[in-house]
Amino acid sequence: MSLALRIQARVLAAQSAIVAHDGDNATAGSPAVAPLPVDRAVATAAAQVGARLRHDLQRLKEIRSIALKIAAKREMLPEYADWVAGLLSGAQTAGTGVSGDVLPTVMVWSIDVGDYAAAMPLIEHVLAHKVAMPQRYARDAATLVVEEIAEAAIKAQAADKPFDLAILEQVEALTAHDDMHDEVRAKLLKAIGFELDRTAQAATDIGADATTLFVRSLTAMKAAQALHDRVGVKTTIKAVEKRLAAVTPETAS
């Protein structure tokens, strides 16, 4: 897509958001809101974005390897950046969300490729505005976000690699009131507990006080255990309890 069309795409996205907002606020008997004038080239940009998404989805469908799918998504994502930025900008101005397949799809792809910094603003938007997920996704937005990010964290932790604790805790806060299966939320709490334990051990290694971190780790893992007995934290809980005891000063009798 040319630079001109990308700029026009931002305009169309913002205008679409304003129209949707005005339509949502209309009351019975009130005059219909006249549609905003949209340049023909901007409408063409919208059609191109939709066509590109259909093309990219077909391309992904033909790829069998998960690794190759992820590589393809990483290659595709920049083509949607300006359109998504326009949607977000328009929604902020209008105070309402914008439905459609592009934004939630880009959110999922950003998670898939591990670009959580790019995914978080989209996650916040999708959850805050109850943006519907495309039909090809079997899960609602909150469940999908929690499970995909929790599983990515657990996979990294199993390979002895750190995962951004701030991302995990932000996802927990954003989805705290969403209804989902206990097994899914337990995965997120497990990932948080494991990452807190890792952080606490690193603090201990440099002589810092890690008591609070160990306590928070145990709290998260015990909550995960309570939600799902087979979430896989029993052994780690015992290990963290021992580490906590080792750094906790004994109370004089």
Image: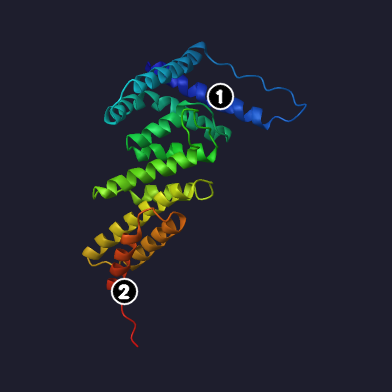
Asked whether, in this view, residue 158 is left or right of residue 109, the answer is left
Q: How is the image coloured?
A: rainbow
Asked whether the viewer can see residue 224, the reply is yes
Asked if the residue at tag 2 contacts the one at tag 1, i.e. Cβ–Cβ closer than 8 Å, the answer is no
Q: What residue appears at the point 44 percent right and 25 percent down from the top-left corner?
A: 83
Q: What residue appears at the point 36 percent right and 40 percent down from the top-left corner?
A: 117
Residue nearest the observer in this picture, 221 or 99: 221
**Residue identifier under label 2:** 248
Does label 1 or label 2 sit earlier along the sequence? 1
User: Residue 30 location in percent, x, y?
Assistant: 75, 26
Q: Which type of secondary structure does the marked residue at label 1 adopt? A: helix
**Residue 16 circle label:** 1
Q: Which type of secondary structure does the marked residue at label 2 adopt? A: loop
**Residue 187 circle label:** none
Residue placed furthest toward the left: 205
Asked whether, in this view, residue 238 is left or right of residue 12, the answer is left
User: Residue 251 location in percent, x, y?
Assistant: 34, 82
Residue nearest the observer in this picture, 190 or 216: 190
* Quadrant in the picture for residue 84: top left
| Dot 2 amino acid type | Thr
* Quadrant in the picture for residue 2: top left
| Dot 1 amino acid type | Ser
User: Residue 64 location in percent, x, y?
Assistant: 30, 25
Asked whether the viewer can see residue 162, the reply is no
User: Residue 244 location in percent, x, y?
Assistant: 31, 69
Residue placed furthest toward the bottom: 253
